[in-house]
Image (cartoon, rainbow, N blue to C red):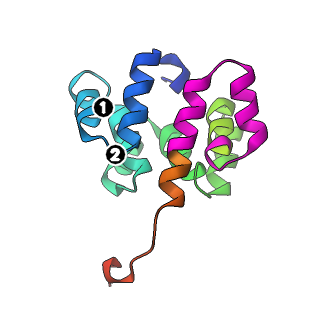
Amino acid sequence: MKQLYDYPVKILLAFEMAVNGKHDFFKWLLQNGYPELAALSNAIRADTSAINWLLNNGYRHFAAFDAASVDDDKALEWLKNHNHSFLALLAEASRGNEKAIEWFNNQHLEIFVRIARQIKNFADNQTFDYHKNPL
């Protein structure tokens, strides 16, 4: 089971850009053997088909991370209870937890601080549009 820390920094930078909505990076991840990161980037951007892809293709931990990174405390507990402490800590950093961010900085894992900030920025800038709510 692949973890985020297993990927080279170059790939994580492409993932960060995909989370930021840069479609060319999403496409690059998809076409170069990283469909799970492409799906995770879209899941973070609220694409339910991407979440389903993660769940159906052996990446439940990434789907749980997506939910935990915003506000789902049950998903955060699931990560902790299933030995995904790194993803749980990254989810906390993505929520703006300064101690979690400090831990990544102290470990010289700045790429994960960048990813956490990208996720938080996306989540903080979402607005609910009741016109788009399915009836």
As displayed, is residue 130 above or below residue 104?
Answer: below
- Which residue sits at x=56%, y=42%? 117
Q: Position of residue 121 (x, y in %)?
A: 52, 51
Q: Main secondary structure of the magenta part?
A: helix
Q: Quadrant of residue 81?
A: top right
* Label disc, if present, on residue 21 of the rendered structure: 2
Answer left or right for 71 relative to 9.
right
Is residue 108 highlighted in magenta?
A: yes
Q: Position of residue 85 (x, y in %)?
A: 69, 32
Which residue in the protein does label 1 denote? Answer: 35
* Crowd band around label 1 with a 10 angstrom C-alpha radius: few (<14), some (14–19), many (20+): some
- Which residue sits at x=41%, y=17%? 10
- Along the viewing direction, whichever of 47 and 56 lies nearer the viewer: 47
Residue at disc 2, secondary structure: loop
Mark 2 or 1: the one toward you: 2
Q: Which residues are magenta?
A: 93-118
- Which residue sits at x=61%, y=45%? 94
